[in-house]
Amino acid sequence: AINDHGRTTETAALAATIRAQGGRALAVDADVTDRTQVLAMTAQIAAELGPINILVNNAGIVLVKPFLELSEADWDRVLATDLKSVFLCCQAVLPSMLERGSGCIINIASELGYLGRALYAPYTAAKGGVITLTRSLAREFAPTVRVNAIAPGPVRTEMLESEMVITGHDESEGVPMGRIGRPEEIAATAVFLASDQASFFCGETLSPNGGILMK
């Protein structure tokens, strides 16, 4: 099931591609900052595809703005998309996972959730929250549900391209690997965490970041 709020053409095309390759896929559209829409989305997925066994919380926006110029609305918008959405989606799927006796949740954080960054206060606060929320959920729901996170370094996405235009900063600078990551590298990390090969990972945050964060 693919949700990318407001981009129904793209999600429908991706779902069609998956089906053409022999898979089962459903494109949905929900604002994951809204509990009612999240519950409707998860109910639709369960009705059409079956129980949700794996949840990847990947919704995110960024705001590049001096801290003293942030409005309360700015703060609330970023925190709602980047952190509240994780809370809502986890609450929506966990009861069914617990009832069935298994499940896997993967939350997408950021290396900035560890490092922080000037002009990125709401984003870094939210991503730091995702990391610690992941640990709390892992402690509460293991061993029935495995909860882990991914904290990518800079990755070549539309959001990062827009950031670099705004800031004028080349995000590959300072990365020991000498380049920005590729989306498929982050996807591969999610596939691993969702697989049985990651059965002993619990509350961990894997960080494919090209060496920008070594901890």
Image (spheres, grey):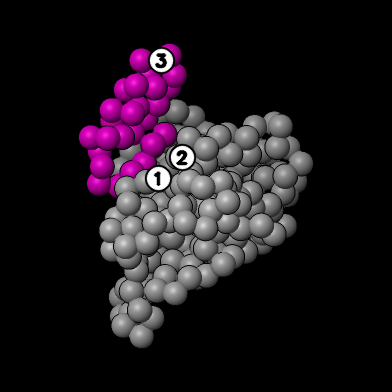
Q: x%, y% of residue 2?
A: 39, 36
Q: Earlier in the sequence, mark 3 or mark 2?
A: 3
Q: Are marks 2 and 1 in contact (CB under 8 Å)?
A: yes
Query: What is the secondary structure assignment of the residue under circle 1?
Result: loop
Res. 77 image quadrant: bottom left
> Which label belongs to residue 182?
2
Q: Which residues are magenta?
A: 1-27
Give coordinates of residue 97: x percent, y percent.
Answer: 61, 42
Report how many numbered discs are placed on residues in the image. Answer: 3
Specify the amino acid type for callout 2. Arg
Name the residue located 37 percent from the left edge and 19 percent from the top edge: 19
Residue at numbered disc 3:
21
Residue 121 in view of the camera: no
Q: Position of residue 103 (x, y in %)?
A: 63, 40
Residue located 58% across and 51% down the image: 176
Q: Measured along the vertical axis of the image, is residue 34 above or below residue 121? A: above
The residue pinned by badge 1 equals 156
Amino acid type, label 3: Gln
Nearer the observer: mark 3 or 2; the answer is: 2
